[in-house]
Image (spheres, grey):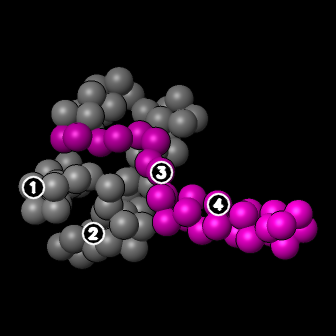
Amino acid sequence: NFELLKNFSEREGHTNVPRDHVEKNIYLGKWMIDQRALKKWGELSLSRQERLEALGVVWKVVNWKEFHDDLEAYWKRWFLLYG
């Protein structure tokens, strides 16, 4: 899967693999979710972590669209109540 991630990164310019992405019949997005979960739980080996980071993996990924949508909803509620 590291080779698939490397190919994805070289092609797309990042390692933020979409959740449902399949590469050569491998669920690469699911695999990346698993790697992030293992790191979060402290169960990812240091060698695997370093190998992933060498490929450019960012551990905490911000979903900007989700953040924007939440912020927009907040302001709409605020203006409805206080505006």
Asked whether the beta carbons under mark 2 and mark 3 sit within 8 Å of each other, the answer is no
Q: Which residue is mark 3?
A: 62
Asked if the residues shown at circle 4 and circle 1 are in contact, with their CB atoms under 8 angstroms apart, the answer is no
Amino acid type of disc 2?
Ile
Q: Is residue 57 magenta?
A: yes
Question: Which quadrant, please, contains the N terminus?
Answer: bottom left
Whichever of callouts 4 and 3 sits on the residue coming sooner in the sequence is 3
Q: In the figure, 21 relative to 14: above or below?
A: below
Label 1 SS: helix
Asked if the residue under mark 3 is in contact with the one under mark 4, i.e. CB atoms within 8 Å, the reply is: no
Mark 3, secondary structure of its residue: loop
Per the rendered image, the range of residues in magenta is 55-83
**Residue named by callout 2:** 26
Query: Which residue is more in the foreground, 54 or 4?
Result: 54
The first of marks 2 and 1 along the sequence is 1
Please name the amino acid that badge 3 sits on: Val
Packing grade of label 1 (10 A; few <14, some 14-19, many >=20) is few
Question: Which quadrant of the rendered structure holds the C terminus?
Answer: bottom right
Q: Nearer the viewer, residue 11 or 5?
A: 11
Asked which secondary structure carries label 2, the reply is loop
